[in-house]
Each structure stands twice: as structure tokens, then as C-alpha cells.
Image (tube, rainbow, N blue to C red):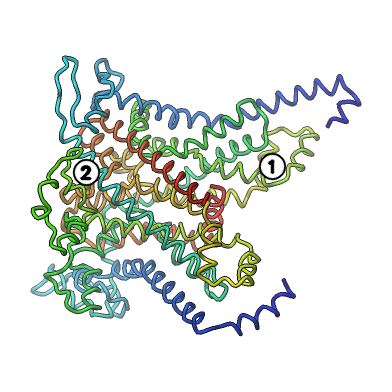
Amino acid sequence: MATAQPLEAPVSAERRSPLAVAFTALGWTVLILFAALEIFPFVFTVANSFKCLPAVQSYPRSLIPTPPFGVECTYQEGEQAGASRSASETSGALTFNPTLEGYQEIFDENLPRWLVNTAFFAVAVTILRLGFDSLAGYALARLKFPGNRLLFFTILGTMMVPPIVLLIPRFIILKQLSMLNTYQGLIVPLAVDAFGIFLMKQFFESIPGEIEEAALVDGANRFVLFWRVVLPMATPALTALAIFSFQGTWNDFLMPLIILSGNQDLWTLPLGLSFLRGAYGETLRWHAFLAGSVITTLPLALIFFYFQRYFVEGISYSGLKG
Amino acid sequence: MSEATTVMPKKRLTTMAAKKRQEAVAGYLFMTPALIIFLVFLIIPIGAAIYLSLTDWNGITPVFDKGAFKFVGLDNYSDLLRGYHTDDAGEIVKATTRQKDFFIALKNTTYYVLGVVPTQTILALILAVILNQRWLKARGFFRTAFYFPSITSSVVISIIFMWMFTRGGLVNTTIQALFGGYDNSQFINWLDDPRGVLHILLEQFGVTRTSVGGWASNRVFGLTLWEWISGPSITMSTIMILNTWTTIGTMMVIFLAALQNIPGSVYEAAAIDGANAWQIFRRITVPLLRPTTFFVVTLGLIGCFQIFDQVYVISSGGPAKTTYTIAYMVYLNGFDRSAMGLAAATAILLFIIIFAFTLLQRTIVKERANI
């Protein structure tokens, strides 16, 4: 490799035909265009979440916040008290005066409660999956017991079943167990997942088993061994699993819709926002909606930027094994 | 291990057996939480879904009450597929709306899948190939930019797209600002336009329902032939753009990982043999990526056939039922129209369709590989 590098560089530099240059330029253009298309909706969303409603409607493209900050969207005093300021008073074509009224409005809609619920669900499901998936994955990878293979293929097979098919029977079972509209009703059915078991099994098979065997000869208990020796070695796989579980539960819509609709106090962020859309009907309060969208996305965005490597590795890992 | 057994046969064997038993017990204990949850919330539900699809349960009467539901055999399936069933007395009971709604949903979903899956696969492949070029700088930045939408909640993305695509919204006004001659009266009503894009296209060539002749009025599965060739409505197209936009990143990351696994020596050998860039792409990259493409297309098919969240938030099946999808019909039948048995039958049919499509594309990919 080290010897090949100096040889390679001059050759490729020499070979840069006009066609190759054109291709490079075309490649850059396509990439930049698509990157802009993927990112700008978020940029506009963040900017508009800080505008007054009339400005959102009339000047959605202004992106530069300028003072005065924290502008009032309605007149506070004088003849027009209570009336909202016109769009051009708080925004121009390029600049706008930021306000927090969208955030204020969505907070008044019980959003803090949804945020807490969503975080609780996501954390609870993630912790349970880390435990149960790795236990099952370890058993399938390392322990010999009758039915081992059969169980593995059954679990793998369940990944084929679309969640929509399970929707109605799960609803009935939860109803029978009196778990509809409860915290546990959403958490327990999601506490194990086939993808996680698969991920953990693959990981355990990829690490050598000598350390465990040595500990077993010393007479260690299997569970203690798993807890003290095996799990600490599995940190990379556990991190990937935690990230996927957290993201999946945080964003899940179908299960909360079926299980939690009847109890407003348990609504999650996606559920709350979607019901708010129904309640608003045609007169959508966009500044508040966009503020809610920003709040829903922000925690995941932070996790994503911090743990990016694991996201990408996990995705490509599942892709290559599939 | 075999050496040890020959040295001290008797004692070793008993401890071996005990160890094996202990290992098996541990195995089952480790599996217990997963097994219980899978059994109660996955295996039993699959069986229950099949059974419920053979009943007329309404979803409201408690399911274990006496007379809560009647076993009706394949009546639900017959309603959905044929538009009628025969009752106990041998009389034919019509269910035209059920059939029509199901096939509207099937038509919409199929157009949706046929539009989204190839587009997202091809775009993802192109982007991945460009990202994999040696000259590229800032690879990490682009990968992040493309992947970011995939981590965002479907509800949030639906809200953002609704906002951008409102009639006087960001998309229309931006098009207006960039290109002249697109004034307010011509604005596309993205979120509320039931016209099919193929119908609109045909109209450009002067083909309308009346001009094509009588055959277009023939009904197949409850819909006229003219209705079948509508293409996705404008509103459905908006949802298609949304979903392509969201999933490109995931698919691109999968393709990129596979591309990086192709050893550079393969390309070098081809270059020495005088292959040009297009030949290398066509004859080396694409064939080597076949398993990945299969995976990406399968993932796309399974995901797209289940499209629900975006429809629920953006259009609730409208305008004029043009965004009814099969998954949305499951929800509508079960939780809105109080026909749980019918909803279960719809869900089972959806499962069969997804399964069939996956098998079909598997055979296509295999046949291609043989050439």
C-alpha cells in the first residue's frame, strides 16, 4: 500500500482527461444538489419555527434572524391591541425578527408532557431490549439446547411479518390484559425485537469464546459470567442496538396510535402532533407545528451527530448480512 | 476434549452430561423473556389475525363474549376480492363498496410502490457510486446530509412536507421565483388534487375518457379500465416524493458499504484491460452489487407496501380516496368502520401481496444473474 501510493498519484494526475474533469464536475453538482434538497427542508423548518404566523405564510424563505429578538406577534397596547402584526412588520424577503411564540403555543398544548412520555417510552424499551435481546442472542450463539436452530429461524421469520398484520390481534390481547392506554401496554410488546436478537447473535458469534470457557472451568455461574464477562465485551453491538431501539421507539407512530389514543396523558410526540393536526383542521398554526417538529427532531439529531459512526455501521452491517 | 475422555472415561462422562444439561437449562432460561413476549405479542397474534379474518367481529363487543362474532369462513375475502358473498340461505349478499375500496387501495399502493422503489434505488445507487469516487472530499459530510432525514419521525416529516407543499407555500412560491410564467392561478394544489398524473399526461395528447371509446368503461374488480390507468393522484405523488426523499439516505448508506467492500484490485484489473468508466460500472459494479440491490429492493418493497403514517397525517385517504392505501384500509376498516374481521382479512391479503412481490423480484434477480 505504502509503496503503491507514490506510483499511483502521478499516473492518475496525468490521465485527467477533459472527460474525467467533466465527470468530476457533474458528480459534485449532483451531490451538492441532492445534499441541498435533503437539508434545506430542515433549515427552513427551523427558521420558520421562530417566526410569527403571518410571516411563516408570506415570507417562508427568509432565513436570516435579525434584531429585535423576541418580537411580539400581536400588538400589546394601543388601538390595535390583540390584533396580530402583519407579515411585513416581522419579516422581509431575507431577514426576519425571531420570536418564541410558536414554541410558547406548542408548549401550551401539553407538549412537555408528550416529550416526557416519549423519552420514558424510548428509554424503557431500549433498556429492556438491551437485556432481553442480548440474553436471547447469547443463548442462540453460544449455548447448545434442543430447538436452538428452530427458535432462531422462527425469530428470523417473524421479521417478515408486517406490523400492520399484528395491529388488530395485539390490540385485542392488550385489551384482554387491561393494558390498553397504559405505559406497560406500549412498552411490553416492544421489549424484545427480532432484529436486536439477530444483531446480538451475530456479534457474539464473531468474538472468541476462550475467555468464557476459562471462566466456566473455574466454576463461574452462567448468568454471572454473562453479566460480568460477556456483556462488557459487547459494548459496540449494544451501542448500535441502543441507538436503533431509541430511534425506533421515539419515532414510532402506529403502535402508540392503536394503544394510547384513549389516554391523552400518555400521548407521545408523534401522536400528539398528529392529533393536533386533526384538531386544527384547515387552519393550521404552522409556526407552532414547526416548533413542535423541531423539538421532536432535536434529541435524535443530537444523538445522531454524536453517535454517527454507530448508525452508519449498524445500517451497513444489517444490510450486508441481509 | 476427546483426549480428556479417553484418559478418565467414567467420571468425565457424568460431569459432561451434567454440564450439557446445565447448559441446556441455561439456554432456555436465557431465552425465556424473549420467548414469552414473542409468544404473546407475535406468534399468537399471527394466528389470531388469520382466525379473525374468518369472522365478522365488529371490534367493539368484547371478543370473548358469547355471540360476539360469527364464523363466516372466507366471506370477508370474497367481499374484498369479488364484491359479494353467499349467506347461509344461499342468497348473494352484495358488498360492492368493500371490493371497490380494496381495489382502489390496491391500485394506489401499487402505483406508489412502482414509483418509489425504482426511483429511490436508482438515485441511492448513483449517489453511492459518486460518494465512493477516490477524488471525493468531505465524504462524511455528504453521508450525514443524505442520511439525516432517515432518523426523523415520519409524522414530523409529514408535517414539514404539508407545510412546504401547501398551495401558497414554500414549494410553489419557490418554483415561481425561480421560473417565470407560473402565476398563482396555475399553482399546483399538491395536497388536494385527485387527478391522476397519467390521466393528466394523456389529456395533454388529447386522450380523454370520452375519446378513447367504450372499452374504458368496462369494469374490472369494481373499477373501470379508465380508473385503473389513472396513475397516482397529484396528492399521492406528493407523498411519493416525500418517501423517496426520506429513504434515499438509508439505501445509499447500504450501497456505499457494499461498494467499499469491492476490492480496488478488481477495478484496476478492468482498467488495465482497457475498460472505460461506463463499462466498469455496467459490467463490474452493478453485477457485484446484485445481492445488495436485492436487499435494498426487498426493504423498499416491504416498507412501501405498508405506507400508512404519511397518509394518516397528510391526507387521511383523500382527496376522493386517491390516497387510500391497503395499510390505511386496515386501520379504517378496523378502528373507524368497526369491521375488525374485514380489517384482519385486508391485513392478511397485504401480507400475501408483499410476500408474492418479494418472491417475484427474487426470481427476476436470479434469472438476470444466469445470463
The quadrant holding residue B167 is: bottom left
Q: Residue furthest front?
A: B371
The residue carrying mark 1 is: A228
Q: Residue at x 50, y 60 (%)?
A: B253
Looking at the picture, which amino acid does disc 2 mark?
Ile
Q: Position of residue A173 (x, y in %)?
A: 37, 28
> A71 or B357: which is nearer to us?
B357
Residue A126 to residue B95: above or below? below
Q: Is residue A90 left or right of residue A126?
A: left
Q: Is residue B5 visible?
A: yes
The residue carrying mark 2 is: B104
Q: For residue A96, which numbered disc appears in the image?
A: none
Q: Are marks 1 and 2 in contact (CB under 8 Å)?
A: no
Instruction: Give the alpha-carbon distance from disc 1 to disc 2, as whole Å.
Output: 57 Å
- Chain of the residue under label 1: A
Q: Residue furthest right?
A: B7
**Disc 2 residue crowd, few under 14, some 14–19, many 20+, Cα 10 Å:** many
Looking at the picture, which amino acid does disc 1 mark?
Arg
Q: Secondary structure at mark 2?
A: helix
Q: Are marks 1 and 2 on the same chain?
A: no
> A98 or A59: which is nearer to us?
A59
Q: Position of residue B18 (x, y in %)?
A: 75, 22
Q: Total label count?
A: 2
The quadrant holding residue B8 is: top right
Q: Is residue B14 left or right of residue B70?
A: right
Q: Position of residue B124 (x, y in %)?
A: 44, 61
Q: Secondary structure at mark 1?
A: helix
Residue A134 to residue B206: above or below? above
